[in-house]
Amino acid sequence: MFSFLYRAFFHFTNSRTNDTMAKFPGVDYFGFDGLLSEEEILVRNTVREFVDEKILPVIEQHNRAGTFPMDLVPAMADLGLFGSTLPQEYGCAGMNNVAYGLVMQELERGDSGVRSFASVQSALVMYPIHAYGSEEQKRTWLPLLARGETIGCFGLTEPDFGSNPGGMLTRAEETSDGYLLNGAKMWITNGTIAGLAVVWAKLNGVVNGFLVEKGTKGFSAPEMKGKHSLRASVTSELILQDVLVPKSNRLPGGSGLKLPLSCLSQARYGIAWGAIGAAMACYDSALNYSRTRLQFGKPIASFQMTQEKLVRMLVEITKSQAICLQLGRLKDAGKVRFQQVSLAKSNNVAVALEIARSARTILGANGILDEYPVMRHMANLESVLTYEGTHEMHTLIVGEDITGIPAFT
């Protein structure tokens, strides 16, 4: 991993258009850097600088326009940000899970939509191909996805089945030529721009994964418009009408709902880290604003109520960092449980949303302007609270784990 990261770091450094260093100092009240390896810090700092120099200067205009900054994709691929925990033999970086989490943290400090793009590409497309695909599928698709030459999407959620994916209506029927897919998916990140969709459908009543390529007859992915949240992200429907895929495009490594749920657990891990980045951005903006905004002849940072808000933000960020760092270490040791991922995702996103709301109050009326990142992060986090498992569903997952009693219905 180390040699790959140094190559990526120097590639990015040499491609910079100016000599400014990263503007963001980080939020590290308890000295978490001392618990990170040299490689992990290198990853974090490289992506932090990339966010400062490449994402922050353009993200507000993309948020206004409702577009994803596609020109960032080659640079993100060069940095090894797609499928970054997968083996180097497939063109990936081979990072550990803490380093991957730090990548997600920094990308979401830029914008949830950018983190979502990388998260879907990595955890929801490349991971299932690596975990459940054939060797031919891995060698065909993983290098293309790692280089950003192909963009992927993950088709699980349906119009009537979000928190209950097992109720999906999408069906696969085996024929002499392959599999015939019929159904519809909704709220699919990257769907319209994807060249490859990992689509989950019931074959003889059992959930299976299929690779559906863009341009296949009967397959379309219209973009969903009119969003107030995740505007710098492409959200789509997937429509499958008698879509014939070859038998070689079924993921052969297993079947059942546990397969897509394992992919979601990978994505939720990254979201837990990403929420810290959004929270950091809001805290940093509010802290800097409070030091310079004068009221009654002195900065508002001198008022007790403002300090209480800032301290509460810092406390929650610090707690979230502790949760994620231990979660990452457990994941690297192969000891993590999906219930622990649920706790981290639900807690970190909820507190990040509260931090965004509190930061907006410190900025006052200025907080609604896109001169500052707070309102954009707040709107994004409203979606992040819901997707990849709602806050309520994750609460019940942990509740069942500690009581032994399921309360989902």
Image: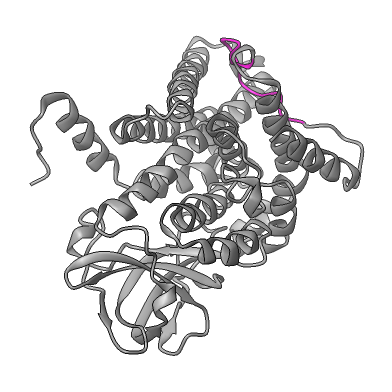
On screen, residue 296 versus residue 15, left or right, reads left
Whether 16 is drawn above or below 335: the answer is: below
Region rendered in magenta? 23-33
Would residue 219 be found to the left or right of residue 56 on screen? left
Q: Nearer the viewer, residue 58 or 26?
A: 26
Q: Is residue 250 magenta?
A: no
Q: Residue at x 75, y 51 (%)?
A: 78
Residue at figure coordinates x 22%, y 31% from the top left: 398
Residue 77, x across and y down, in percent: 69, 53
Q: Please tell me which residue is depicted at 39% across the width and 74% down the height of the picture.
A: 238
- For this orientation, the residue located farthest to the front is 135
Q: Quadrant of the N terminus?
A: top right
Asked if residue 30 is among those painted magenta in the image, a careful observer would answer yes
Type of secondary structure dominating the magenta stretch: loop
Q: 271 left or right of 261?
A: right
* Picture coordinates of residue 230, whole percent (x, y): 49, 55
User: Residue drawn at (39%, 78%), measured in percent from left and top?
Assistant: 247
Residue 66 visible in the shown view: no
Left or right of 361? Residue 147 is: right
Q: How many marks?
A: 0
Instruction: Give above or below for 216 relative to 154.
Output: below
Please state the horizontal and vertical placement of residue 107, each as a whole percent of the image.
61, 42
Q: Which one is in front, 324 or 365? A: 324
Pinpoint residue 348: horizontal percent, then vertical percent. 41, 31
